[in-house]
Amino acid sequence: MARCLPAVPAALLLSCLPLALAMAPPADAAAPESRLLREAAELRDRALADSDAWQHAWSLTTEVGPRPAGSAGDRAAVTWALTRLADIGFDEIRPQPVEVAAWERGTAEARVVQPFPQRLTVTALGLSIGTPETGIEAPVARFESLAALEAAKPEEVRGRIVFIDERMERMRDGSGYGAAVQKRSRGPSVAAARGALALVIRSVGTSTHRFAHTGATRYEQGVRQIPAFALSNPDADLVTAQFAAGEEVRLYLYSSARNLAPTRSANVIAEIRGAERPDEIVIMAAHLDSWDLGTGAQDNATGVATLMETARFIAMMPRRPARTVRLVLYANEERGLDGSRAYTGAALQAEQRHVLGIEADGGGGLIYRFDSGVAEHAFPVIDAMREILAPLGIEGGDNTARGGADLSTLRAEGMPVLSLRHDMSAYFDLHHTANDTLDKVDPEALKQAVAAYASVVWIAANVEDDFGATVPGASD
Ligand SMILES: [Zn+2]
């Protein structure tokens, strides 16, 4: 992955500061006062110069490593978070028990049997069942897309291994993922409903290297479950190339993956209590779990590390924020959002007032854009945030932000969100692969991220007005 530096060096940033203040929005009912903007700018500059989120990322990927939900690594990650957060200056830290879906990868194997026998680089999809002990050998039915499979006649599929060869598009905003991931989540049931024996997909990812990308699949209720695998992109090319000979292509597949009884994990919740309105919560979200193939560096040690360091800088401010700033490190995002549902269920029941949310789950690339999903009356505050972010090389976006996966359950209840968009051009080269390791994390980019998250969260936690609905319940 290309190393990158923040677009604007720290020294230049300081000289930009008076300009940013000069451009502060005119007096408005919801416009932050200049003292708050000055604090946010100072916090931004201090974080850009002195933050060290990389240390947290180093520690999580090195001392804990892979942490799939329900595993020993996952339990170690919860203990790691509880211990490490204790040094950050929070007023309260607590685990929230969460029941998580447990799954064991086992081993997987794939090869072309004919026309030209070769071994393939493959991985089981998360939550997939395994094959019989003797594996599965069958002719392959290849489809260009999930839509093509959906349009297929059962006789083209029955008794075969279905191969969906759909490619993912490389995009700065990562939007190629949403389309490409459908074949992973829905593919097995679509194939099984037409009589397939197993499913193999081209990895949902942009890497041209020989790493298969895992990720969760989901079996539809009432449809037969079949084993599901992902081939690395070059191996998907290899299978496709074998079809060029015009002969039947046969694959052999083996997997010992299995689903296990649900087990225990935990969300880790830590908060800096608001000095004036402690019952109003600004929530910062990242997921603590990871896939097992790599060390979960980009996904999502970078998000965890960035928000831990953001909280540390907020806790070091000379005063407490007006609102409570709460960091939630979620359990089992990857295999079904168990932590998200548990958190939101409990928060709604306790009628905890969530004013705004921001999530970090887009990797450690430089942030290039700032989007919001707030009520119009909060636009003056968003404009002020944009001006604070501009010297970091972050441009203003639009008001269509929906937050990340873990915040989706609160967003569904109407909670407003902010979104700092990380450059994801290279993210899906690593995502969910054995290659998602610490060496790809750029410490300088993390400094920019901490500066951005800290300054917008500081403003959000101190302005008078809300951002629209508070969850649960509505304020006017
Ligand atoms: Zn993630």
Image (cartoon, helix red, strand yellow):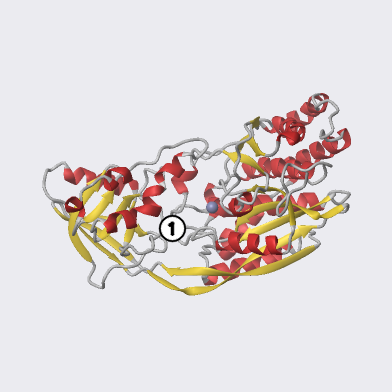
* Residue 102, percent from left and from top: 47, 70
Q: Residue at x 35, y 64 (%)?
A: 222
Tell me: 258 left or right of 409.
left
Specify whether 71 is left or right of 467: left
The quadrant holding residue 460 is top right
Q: Is residue 402 left or right of residue 115?
A: right
Amino acid type for the residue under numbered disc 1: Ala
Mark 1 CB lies closer than 8 A to ligand 1: no
Residue located beneath label 1 in the image = 216
User: Around disc 1, counting alpha carbons within 10 Å, would you say few (fewer than 14), some (14 to 19), or many (20 or more)?
Assistant: some
Q: Secondary structure at mark 1?
A: loop
As rendered, which of 463 and 91 lies closer to the eye?
463
Image coordinates of residue 189 in percent, x first then y, are: 33, 57
Q: Which residue: 46% across, 48% down?
A: 430
| Residue 367: quadrant of the picture | top right
From where the camera sits, is residue 105 visible?
A: yes
Quarter of the picture containing the C terminus is top right
**Compared to 45, does 413 lie above or below?**
below
Q: 41 or 347, which is in the foreground?
A: 347
Does residue 459 lie above or below 413 as drawn? above
